[in-house]
């Protein structure tokens, strides 16, 4: 039994040694990523530890990735990697696990610059702000449909917008969720004078992104200012909606 165990350990070690030498560039070229709209300038290292620079998606610059993968994840029938990302829109870190039937991301911590995100109305880009995610997670099935999501998030866009008009508006908070198969992030908050703010950010399975913002119970002067920005009066509040096409430029 001892000899069999040693042989098995040797075979597993040899297998890991062979696989660990596979260049990351080779895997990316043969993974069908180009057909899905993913591009890159350079991929260095191996599948177990490598770097990708000049990463893009449907002609949008995404940035660079540092990837560290775990051979032990293969025992569970998946391929797991720790990811560190930095790009024009911010930075993030987390874990991604890929199997034949699902893709899962977990432990995500991120800080994103609203002014650099696709699907945000130009007027709100000019306001700017930071979207922060903590301990975020999401799961997608083989067709890219969102099946589960969790975590915490906060966005200071509304607070920054309020400063422009001399208002004490809140930082919005929320949690990622799946709605009709799309990954969405609903955020909300209340002002000191009864104002209500709701923002929903969404990522569609085809790669498009968007943002809806709704405000209620603002004073007439603030309503007029938002109307000038492009907000639409919808009965008891004002709304602004934006969705990015896959070819939208920054």
Image (cartoon, helix red, strand yellow):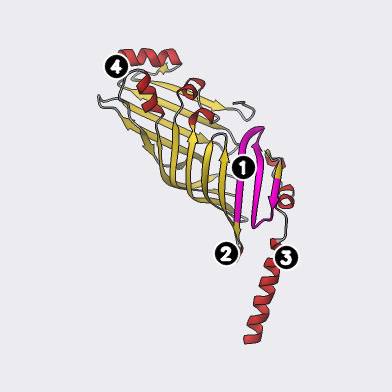
Task: Give how far apart the Cα atoms at labels 2 and 4 are.
Answer: 57 Å
| Corner quadrant of residue 231 | top left
Q: Is residue 116 left or right of residue 233?
A: right
Give the mark nearest the N terminus, 3 or 4: 3
Question: From what the image shows, is residue 239 above or below residue 189?
Answer: above
Task: Give how far apart the Cα atoms at labels 1 and 3 are.
Answer: 26 Å
Please name the residue that numbered disc 2 is placed on. Answer: 76
What residue sits 57% from the left and 64% below the top? Answer: 76
What residue sits 67% from the left and 56% below the top? Answer: 47
User: What's the mark number on residue 64?
Assistant: 1
User: What's the mark number on residue 219?
Assistant: 4
Task: Give how far apart the Cα atoms at labels 1 and 4 are.
Answer: 44 Å
**Does the magenta run of residues contain 121?**
no
Task: Give how far apart the Cα atoms at labels 3 and 4 are.
Answer: 67 Å
* Image location (x, y in percent) of residue 57: 64, 37
- Give the magenta part as a residue range: 43-68
Mark 3 Cα-neighbour bin, 10 Å: few <14, some 14–19, many ≥20? few
Please name the residue that numbered disc 3 is placed on. Answer: 18
Task: Give how far apart the Cα atoms at labels 2 and 3 are.
Answer: 19 Å
Q: Main secondary structure of the magenta part?
A: strand
Q: Are marks 3 and 4 in contact (CB under 8 Å)?
A: no
- Closest to the observer: 178 or 210? 210
Q: Secondary structure at mark 4?
A: loop
- Closest to the observer: 145 or 6? 6
Give the mark nearest the N terminus, 1 or 4: 1
* Image location (x, y in percent) of residue 12: 66, 72
């Amino acid at each position: 039994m001892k000899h069999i165990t040693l042989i098995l350990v040797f075979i597993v070690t040899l297998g890991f040694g062979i696989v660990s030498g596979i260049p990351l560039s080779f895997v990316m070229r043969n993974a069908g990523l180009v057909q899905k709209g993913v591009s890159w300038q350079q991929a260095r290292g191996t599948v177990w530890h490598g770097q990708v620079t000049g990463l893009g998606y449907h002609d949008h610059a995404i940035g660079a990735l540092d990837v560290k993968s775990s051979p032990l994840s293969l025992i569970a029938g998946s391929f797991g990697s720790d990811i560190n990302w930095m790009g024009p829109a911010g930075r993030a870190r987390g874990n991604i696990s890929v199997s034949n039937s699902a893709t899962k991301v977990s432990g995500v911590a991120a800080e994103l610059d609203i002014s650099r995100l696709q699907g945000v109305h130009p007027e709100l880009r000019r306001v700017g702000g930071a979207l922060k995610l903590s301990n975020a997670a999401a799961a997608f099935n083989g067709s890219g449909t969102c099946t589960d999501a969790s975590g915490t998030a906060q966005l200071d866009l509304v607070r920054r917008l309020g400063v422009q008009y001399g208002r004490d508006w809140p930082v919005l908070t929320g949690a990622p969720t799946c709605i009709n198969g799309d990954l969405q992030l609903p955020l909300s908050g209340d002002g000191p004078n009864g104002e209500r703010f709701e923002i929903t950010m969404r990522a569609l399975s085809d790669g498009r992104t968007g943002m809806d913002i709704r405000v209620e119970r603002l004073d007439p002067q603030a309503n007029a200012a938002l109307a000038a920005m492009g907000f639409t009066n919808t009965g008891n509040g004002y709304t602004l909606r934006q969705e990015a096409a896959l070819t939208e430029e920054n």
